[in-house]
Image: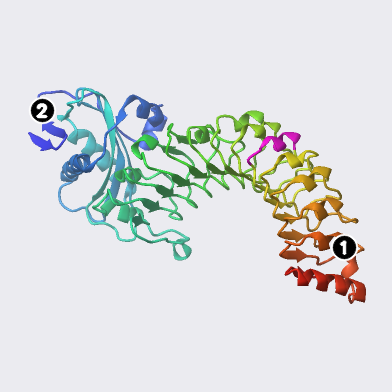
Amino acid sequence: MKTLLVLALTLTMGTSFAQSRVLTREEAVRNGIDEQVLGNQYMGYRINERGMGAINAFQEEIVKLFKGTPNPGFYLMGTLYADEKGKIDYLIYQIIADHPALDSLRQAVKTKLTEGLVGWKFENTKGQAYRFGFSIAIGTRPNDLLKTVPNWSTRKVRTGDSTLATVDDALTFSDTLKVKKLFLNQLNLTELPAVIYRFPNLEELDLHANQLTTIYIDAQRLPRLQKVDLRENKLTNESLTISRNNSIQILNIQRNLFTDIPDAVRSCRRLTSLWIGGNQLTELSNGSFRQLRYLRDINLYQSGLTRLPKGVRKLRRLEVIDLYYNQLVQLPPSVTKLRRLNYLAVSHNQLTELPKRLDRLRRLQVMYAHHNRLSTLPDGVARMPQLRLLDLGYNWYTTFPGEIGKLTTLKELDISGNNLHEFPESLLALKQLEKLYLRGNPFLKGSLDKKYSMLIDQLKTNATEVYY
């Protein structure tokens, strides 16, 4: 018997294991085996220092199945599922290799694993079905196997303590408890590497700019994971799955193929920041915003929106909303129910008016509304005491909105690119104004007459920087 710390791997040659299934991930999909369902049926194996020793010992046994030193080598990643008696039910794996006879390699690996697992059994002292992931380098490691991608030369690699930035490093790094950040961006990955589960203290996972079409993240195996970056892949509403968790707080899924907020988002029960811009959210509805009670920041930048569903009011804790570069002609009145909102960005839309009760947003500090078709402001804007920055540049104003003159705590104002023929003298009342942008208005064409020059000089004496 070989004791593998908590798990014990024993050879019991007289026992038949005909029901064990050794499958590639592709075969599992073809056979209707859903790893998400398996993840719910088999508890995650508790990974601590002792547990990692057990898993490493198991991986050493796998390496022994491949006699000699295969050259070129390859990487074997996957998940093992064992029943309550320790019998292996499933071993689902993937191969990463740059091999001259890849099909032959795949067949050889399948045969070795299938035959080699006969007679293997794990001692299971807890009497519960469980699972654990493995990542194994076999043979002579091809040094650049995971770096031969088109954009490698321009890849942005971040370094630092507790940080890894290649699959190769993730496979071979020994102090797995130390790693907190894993940056596997721009590697042309087509599958989620199982190696991520080597690091139980992982806090940040970056997989952006790969070729991922399907992802299942078993968050229970990464209990400290807080930030996930999946932008610039090929994910759809149905192809992203994340197990229910209370750890993930920041999720970036920009520029994929989503048409709605996927259910995977709602599996992150404590999510505070969602960046989903750059998708064509044609199916966004009132129900899209359900079960996002902790969300404080949502980015819907360039999402093809012609309307914002009134269901946005469900985001009661929302502080920041970014709606840049859409085709919105109006905002729903329900947006004024977002009483904690302090940052509203609606620039580059087709808005002709803002909600009449905008003043209900008592905490609003920043509003970007440039490049729209606004010509008036709601009366209530004058009753927004915390507003510090207001950008109304490049709209359709021909008359300066008088409400602005009552915002005595305003720090920055941009009214560039409008059609104002007179200098707004009410600006002189804004004693706390630090920056004022006036460029591109008719009253500035040609040289300033003496009257306007004196008014601008007066603003400057209030320590206001004037750009004209």
Looking at the picture, which amino acid does disc 1 mark?
Glu
Label 2 is placed on what type of residue? Thr
Inspect this view and state whether residue 417 appears: no
Which residue position is annotated with label 1?
425
- Tell me if mark 1 has few (under 14), some (14-19) or many (20+) residues whose alpha carbon lies within 10 angstroms of its own: few
Residue shown at 83%/66% (left/top)?
440
| Quadrant of res 333 | top right
Report x, y in % for residue 57: 17, 42
For residue 227, above or below residue 142: above
Image: magenta residue range: 332-340
**Residue 336 is covered by the magenta coloring:** yes
Q: Where residue 52 sits: x, y (%)?
A: 22, 42
Element under disc 2: loop
For the residue pair 310 and 230, the one nearer the viewer reads as 310
Residue 12 shows which numbered tag? 2
Q: Quadrant of the C terminus?
A: bottom right
Point out the image quarter for the N terminus.
top left
For this orientation, the residue located farthest to the left is 1
Sequence-wise first label, 1 or 2? 2
Q: Is residue 39 left or right of residue 256?
A: left
Question: Which structural element holds mark 1?
Answer: helix
